[in-house]
Image (cartoon, rainbow, N blue to C red):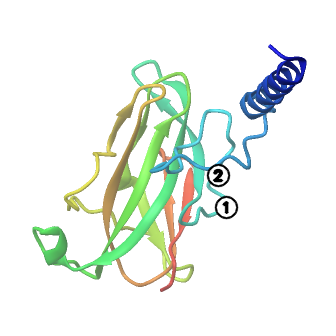
Amino acid sequence: MRPSIRVATLLAGALLTAGLTTACSSSGDDSKAPAAAGSSPQAPSGDAAGKSGKTPITIGDFGTYRTAGGASGARTTMSVTFKDLRAVQASEIKATKPPQHQYVVLTFTVKNTGDKEGAFHPQQLKWTDGESPERAVATTEKSGSGQNLDTTFRPGQSATGDVVLDIPGAGGTLRYYDGSGPVSLSFELPAD
């Protein structure tokens, strides 16, 4: 092989190797990497610190609470992400009875981020507008989509599902009580 062709071949090989090495190296900063197609935010990991009962969670945000789970009463951490809220007519969800006020469907993702069993019970949600006393607003109505959230979750287990509420007005605050203690989580409902 002639020397000029050999040098050109070696130079092309070196540039190709350098380009591949740079493209495949991991700098640890994937912030500029494109998101995978169809990916969506997941429930937070056990290391993430969400809001507690004192700071209301808004749509797209999450909060965490500690709960006693299983027969042993051991405590674990649960995470709840407030995914969506929509007002519906009774006919849209095939309700078994008309609402006293207005049906709204809230979508949550609940995840056990601890290392023991833990539960989430939507019937423990109470609503207030800040002026009137808290009232129970959870219903037994189903939206027809999503997973059952009224259950015990094993460590790492998660589910996304709907909770149907019957609330007196737009806006307000939902408070979740895990047991008889203080507010575990609170959710800010948009006024419009």
Q: Is residue 10 above or below residue 141?
A: above
Tell me if residue 158 can be seen: yes
Mark pair 2, 1: CA separation: 6 Å
Packing grade of label 2 (10 A; few <14, some 14-19, many >=20) is some
Q: Position of residue 45 (x, y in %)?
A: 60, 36
Instruction: Label 2: state its secondary structure.
Output: loop
Q: Position of residue 182 (x, y in %)?
A: 58, 51
Q: Which residue occupies 50% across, 73% down?
A: 189
According to the picture, the residue beneath numbered tag 2 turns out to be 52
Looking at the image, how many numbered discs can be counted on the residues? 2
Say what amino acid the circle numbered 1 marks. Answer: Thr
Instruction: Name the one closer to the observer, 123 or 10.
Output: 10
**140 lies left or right of 135:** left
Q: Is residue 8 left or right of residue 101?
A: right
Q: Which mark is residue 55?
A: 1
User: In the drawing, does residue 186 fall left or right of residue 89?
Assistant: right
Decide if residue 183 is in sight here: no
Q: Position of residue 18 (x, y in %)?
A: 82, 28
Placement of the N terminus among the 4 image quadrants: top right
Q: Residue at x 56, y 54 (%)?
A: 185
Q: Position of residue 3 (x, y in %)?
A: 89, 17
Camera-nearest residue between 54 and 145? 145
Q: In the displayed structure, would residue 17 be above or below residue 77?
A: above
Check disc 1: other Cα within 10 Å, few if <14, some if 14-19, many if 20+.
Answer: few
| Picture residue at 18% right of the left edge, 74% below the top | 92
Q: Amino acid at mark 2?
A: Ser
Farthest front residue in view: 2
SS for dot 1? loop
Check contact, mark 2 vs mark 1: CB within 8 A: yes
Q: Quadrant of residue 87?
A: bottom left
Question: Which residue: 21% across, 77% down?
Answer: 99
Position of 24 relative to 160 (above/below): above
